[in-house]
Structures are given as C-alpha cells and as structure tokens.
Amino acid sequence: MNTTNLTRKNMADLLLALNGTTGTPPLTVLQETSPAFHNEKDLPPIIQKLLKPVKGEIGFSLNEIVSLGNLIEFTNFPQSTVQNWVKRDVRGLIGSPQLGKKYTTEQAAMLFIVEDLKATLDFDSIRKVLTLVFNNIDDRTDDIVNPTDLYFAYATVFDQIHHHRGPILETAQDSFNDTIKIFVNEKCKSLLSSFRNLKEEELSIVLNVMVLLVMTVQSGFYQAETKKYMSGALALS
C-alpha cells in the first residue's frame, strides 16, 4: 500500500480511535495497517499533526478534513469543492463547526460519506438519503445511527469485497453481478446487530443505506479504473 494511501476501513478505524471510541491509540491503528506506518517520521503531515496530544475532544479544520480525505484510496477531495459542500450543497446535513472553529469526527465522517455518494447521486438525492439516518444536525442523539459507525460499517463491507478473497465466481450459481449483490446484502445484514436499540423499520432503512453506500463506492472504484485505462489509451496514441 502507498504510504499516503488508506482504505476506507483504515480511515474508519482511525476516526474511531481519534474520538476515543475504540480505546486503541491512533498510531497503533495505523501501524496495524502496514509496515510503512511504523516510522512516525514517514507519516503524512496531516497524520503527524492529528497524532499530537490535545485537550478534550479532537476537532478538524476543513483543510485538515480535506487532507485526511485525500489519503483515502481512489478519492478526489478538492478543497474548493468541499467548501462549497459545507456552505451550500449539504450545509443542512453537515452544519457549522461544533467544536469552536473545528469540525467533529462525526462531521468529518459525514463529508467522507458525501464524497462516496457523489459517485452515483446528485445532491438532492444525497440529502434525501442521509436525512433518513441523520436527523437534526445539531443533535447527534436523534440520529438513527452515528455517522462514524455508519462509515465504519459500510467501509468494512467494501473492504471485504476489495481487499479480501471472495466467493469463487466460476462455481457460483448466479451471474457475477448477482453474486456481488448477494454478497453485499448478506454482509450488510450481518452488521446490523452492531446498531443497537433500533426498530425493525429503522434497521431496514440502515440496511438499504449501507448497501447503497457499498455499491456507490464500488462504482467509484470502477470510475477510477476507467480513467486509468483512458489515460493509458491516450498515452498510446
């Protein structure tokens, strides 16, 4: 893995470590992803900055969220674009910085989720989808699920598709696309138990949103690969 490249699962683990949810030190989380992170001096500047001790809850400037987001594999996170998001396109979902002038880990996760959804959805659709699981942006207690938990869940499922060996397609009874769809649905269902105290209707909403997110990340991967092959073809002309 590139020293400045993290999977979505890596990023989700890092966010949960930074906000103290897991109890695992953030540096340990990074070092478990790759030997490339064992030398602290070789860490990306944004990571070095975030690893410094802080008093109270950790917060992020918009620039820091952009720098962090650009570490995620096949992600394009231009600062000007993200500024437009928080000022206009998804302002009602992200809200103002909740830690003085800094954004919370939940708000950072929300922006990463928006970036993933942009692979297939317009902003009107994104707002409708995310409003299903996140209600009042100033009150995280009324969310069906926490943004970082949702990010972790679908990142975990996508990680199993993209970075682990899957079912043997040659012996599968369904087509390639159907096999992937069934696999994604089953893996998302298996993670529903991690979301506690949800009603049946709420679990159905979370399941559909999780599957949607995994599929849109997969779509983003294919888009990134398409651009690579296009560049390769043009280079040969």
Image: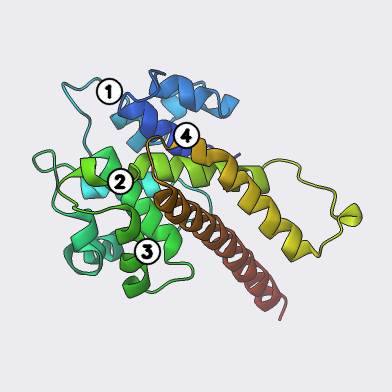
Which of marks 3 and 2 precedes in the sequence?
2
Name the disc covering residue 194, or none.
Answer: 4
Percent of width and height locating residue 47: 37, 33
Which numbered disc, 1 or 4, marks the residue that appears first in the sequence? Answer: 1
The label number, if any, that marks residue 52 in the structure image: 1
> For mark 3, what is the residue?
129
Which residue has dot 2 on it? 108
Indicate which disc, 2 or 1, sits on the residue closer to the N terminus: 1
- Amino acid at the residue labelled 4: Ser
Q: Nearer the viewer, mark 4 or mark 2?
A: 4
Q: Is residue 23 left or right of residue 179?
A: left
Is there any visible trace of residue 28 in the rendered image? yes
Amino acid carrying mark 2 in the image: Ala
List the single residue furthest toward the bottom: 237
- Name the quadrant of the C terminus: bottom right
Which is more foreground, mark 1 or mark 4? 4
Which residue lies at the image location 29% right of the left edge and 52% below the top edge?
134
Residue toward you, 142 or 199:
199
Alpha carbons under labels 4 and 3: distance apart = 21 Å
Earlier-in-chain disc, 4 versus 3: 3
Mark 2 against mark 1, which lies toward the viewer?
2
Q: Secondary structure at mark 1?
A: loop
Count the marks: how many? Answer: 4
Is residue 9 something one can see in this rendering? no
- Say which amino acid is labelled 1: Lys
